[in-house]
Image (cartoon, helix red, strand yellow):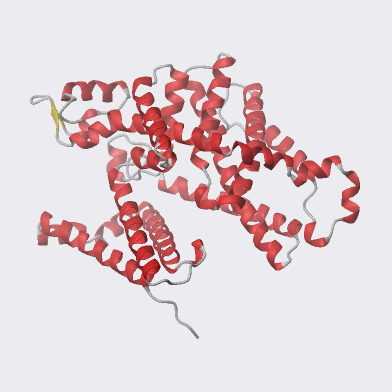
């Protein structure tokens, strides 16, 4: 791509997307970029990836249509509405919250969204439409998410596809009622974001209820506890995101108001923004998006999971390379286990999976802690940051080799844990 696309064309495309070419080292004299790979990714590849992710999500949803239909047919909540006498014979381990709680809660959500001034919208009527769309799409995708998690597990739950489908459908509804332009973009994002959270929570809730069923818990009590957990988590996560979005002194001096997207990359959020801006603004580069769509279709015809590949196409190489290495280690570990004829373990309980999950959770948690400390104690965190000292002492090349060495050591530890024989008592 770098040999086919001129620097001037990339410059024009970045400018069209509202991105500053100077950030990628644009040299007006040589008409080239110092960081050409990043410039090409921002200008073209990200849009191709967005089309591939959207198509992969829709393909995944289409493949799960039989599951979607059976989910609604077998829904206990719908059945309980039809059979009013069922409540009299329900066992303790089958007692759920009444469907009336769901109905009243949905109504309350619509009213709250209509009255809250922080919800984007010109008036109460427009915010009422947002609440209605959230309830309609939520009822659909929550059922789908719960069913899919029960059948194929939470790791294969196509949350991205559901969110993209919701955003596109919401944008089409907006276009249908004549709402186009920048002012309506945050409104579409609100609907998509809430459905994303709802679908993810639905899968987790189903797993919790499954565990409760195994140990003989009362579903109603679990559901009340989940309400409390969601409320507390929302407060903590909302506060955390607000703190992370606070720009550093250096960024603030440059006029940057939001650290998320600058200091902390947000690829999925950027994907949603690209789709919303393109559809409502009418200037989506459909030629690039359609390239991604056909890439996804070809992959599916080749019996490759299009959504997984599409996410890798969209995300930058710095994000996907560690994932690839982790998958490679997993493949080597599985091959060794098959060669030694070791007994198969449940997917989520494999030693390598558990260790890798700990690495992901630990890294994410420490990253958030470090970011929060940086916001409150910026000068203090700079004083304990040894990156500049070590890089100057070793030189840039040796510093990078040191980083690769630490990563290789961690990969080796993961492989040893994954291939370690289970101790027998």
Residue 46 position in % (x across, y down)? 33, 33
Image point (53%, 23%), residue name:
171
Image point (36%, 58%), residue name:
370
Q: Determine which quarter of the picture holds residue 232.
A: bottom right
Report whether 156 appears left or right of 131. Answer: left
Report whether 141 appears left or right of 376. Answer: right
Report whether 157 appears left or right of 263. Answer: right
Residue 360 position (above or below residue 169): below
| Total tally of numbered discs in the picture | 0
Residue 244 position (above or below residue 57): below
User: Is any atom of residue 267 visible in this view?
Assistant: no
* Camera-nearest residue between 339 and 382: 339
User: Is any atom of residue 395 visible in this view?
Assistant: yes
Residue 89 position in % (x across, y down)? 89, 55
* Camera-nearest residue between 173 and 155: 155
Give the quarter of the figure containing the N terminus.
top left
Task: Name the residue at the bottom extreme.
Answer: 425
Image point (27%, 43%), residue name:
250
* Camera-nearest residue between 415 and 11: 415
Image point (35%, 26%), residue name:
291
């Amino acid at each position: 791509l770098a040999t086919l696309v001129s620097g001037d064309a990339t410059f024009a495309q970045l400018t069209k997307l509202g991105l500053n070419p100077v950030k990628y080292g644009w040299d007006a004299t040589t008409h080239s970029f110092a960081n050409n790979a990043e410039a090409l990714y921002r200008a073209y590849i990200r849009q191709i990836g967005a089309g591939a992710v959207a198509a992969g999500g829709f393909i995944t949803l289409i493949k799960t249509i039989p599951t979607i239909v059976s989910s609604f047919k077998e829904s206990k909540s719908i059945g309980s509405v039809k059979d009013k006498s069922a409540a009299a014979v329900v066992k303790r381990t089958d007692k759920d919250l009444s469907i009336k709680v769901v109905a009243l809660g949905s109504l309350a959500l619509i009213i709250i969204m209509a009255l809250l001034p922080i919800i984007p919208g010109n008036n109460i009527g427009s915010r009422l439409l947002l609440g209605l769309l959230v309830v309609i799409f939520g009822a659909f995708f929550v059922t789908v998410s719960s069913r899919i998690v029960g059948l194929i597990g939470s790791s294969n739950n196509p949350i991205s596809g559901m969110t993209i489908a919701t955003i596109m459908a919401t944008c089409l509804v907006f276009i249908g009622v004549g709402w186009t332009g920048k002012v309506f973009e945050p409104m579409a994002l609100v609907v998509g974001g809430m459905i994303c959270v709802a679908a993810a929570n639905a899968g987790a809730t189903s797993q919790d209820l499954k565990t409760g069923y195994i140990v003989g818990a009362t579903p109603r009590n679990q559901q009340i506890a989940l309400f409390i957990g969601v409320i507390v988590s929302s407060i903590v996560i909302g506060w955390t995101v607000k703190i992370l979005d606070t720009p550093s002194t250096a960024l603030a001096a440059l006029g940057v108001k939001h650290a998320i997207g600058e200091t902390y990359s947000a690829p999925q959020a950027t994907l949603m923004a690209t789709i919303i801006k393109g559809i409502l603004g009418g200037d989506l580069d459909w030629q690039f998006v359609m390239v991604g769509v056909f890439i996804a279709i070809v992959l599916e015809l080749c019996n490759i999971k299009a959504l997984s590949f599409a996410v890798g196409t969209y995300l930058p190489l710095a994000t996907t390379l560690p994932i690839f290495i982790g998958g490679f280690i997993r493949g080597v570990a599985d091959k060794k286990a098959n060669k030694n004829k070791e007994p198969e373990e449940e997917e989520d309980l494999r030693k390598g999976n558990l260790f890798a999950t700990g690495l992901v959770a630990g890294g994410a948690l420490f990253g958030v802690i470090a970011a929060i400390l940086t916001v409150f104690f910026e000068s203090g965190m700079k004083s304990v940051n040894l990156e500049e000292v070590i890089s100057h002492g070793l030189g840039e090349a040796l510093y990078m080799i040191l980083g690769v060495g630490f990563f290789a050591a961690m990969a080796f530890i993961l492989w040893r844990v994954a291939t370690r024989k289970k101790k027998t008592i």
